[in-house]
Structures are given as structure tokens and as C-alpha cells.
Image: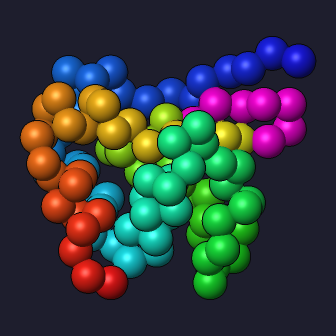
Amino acid sequence: MTSKVLPQPERDEIRVEAVLQALGEPVRLTIVRALAEQPAGIACGEIELPVTASTRAHHLRTLREAGVISTHTDGTRRISILRREDLEKLYPGLLSGVLAAKQ
């Protein structure tokens, strides 16, 4: 089976206002925290969230389009990975600070 990367901004296209808006929603922040604990990535359905599948897909798409995560297909699964290196290069300390904030 082939792997396909879903559309996402290149590193130089990631904008801080889009990242902050994406991270400012509690469900999306939960997703980012879960991905931070799984550096190799995780299938979107494996993250425990109190939302419907369509709402989950919306939140994942918002994070991907903002440049916070990268998503690729693996057969019928979609694997998401936190773009930690890209975000750290562009906005040093931002992601670390967000992840360290109390829940």
C-alpha cells in the first residue's frame, strides 16, 4: 500500500496567527498533547475525544491546514504527526510553552 501525505503548508507558509488560532481550541489542544506523547504519530481514531467523527475530522484538518500537524495515509488509516521541528524553527519555544501550560 502506498502512503499519501495530505495537503499542508510548507514550513515557510506556516503563519503564527493560524497556529495560535488552531491551538486555542480545547479539543485541538487535546489532540496536540496526545501527538506530543507519540513522536512517531498516531491514527486519528485512537485519540480519545468527546466529539463525533466528523467534528474530529474538522479539528484534525484545522490543525493540518495551520501547519501544526502533518497527516499521511497508511492503508485506510490516517496517521497524524506533530510538526514539532517546523514549529520550533519558526516560533522557538511556542509549542513547548503551550504543552507545558496547565490543563
Q: Is residue 28 left or right of residue 75?
A: left
**Residue 65 appears anywhere in the view:** no
Residue appearing at x 33%, y 39% in the figure: 84
Whole-percent x, y for residue 7 in the image: 51, 28
Q: Which quadrant of the figure contains the C terminus?
A: bottom left
Residue 50 drawn above or below residue 44: below
Quarter where residue 24 is shown: bottom left
Q: Is residue 75 left or right of residue 25?
A: right
Residue 103 drawn above or below residue 13: below
Residue appearing at x 65%, y 65% in the figure: 47
Residue appearing at x 44%, y 43% in the figure: 82
Residue ranking furthest to the top: 2
Quarter where residue 15 is shown: top left
Quarter where residue 101 is shown: bottom left
Q: Is residue 2 magenta?
A: no
Image coloring type: rainbow
Q: Is residue 80 left or right of residue 10?
A: right
Q: Is residue 103 left or right of residue 19?
A: right
**Residue 39 appears anywhere in the view:** yes
Whole-percent x, y for residue 53 in the image: 72, 68
Whole-percent x, y for residue 54 in the image: 67, 65
What is the magenta segment's predominant secondary structure?
strand
Residue 50 drawn above or below residue 21: below
Q: Nearer the viewer, residue 15 or 48?
A: 48
Q: Is residue 76 magenta?
A: yes
- Which residues lie in the magenta part? 71-77
Q: Which quadrant of the figure contains the N terminus?
A: top right
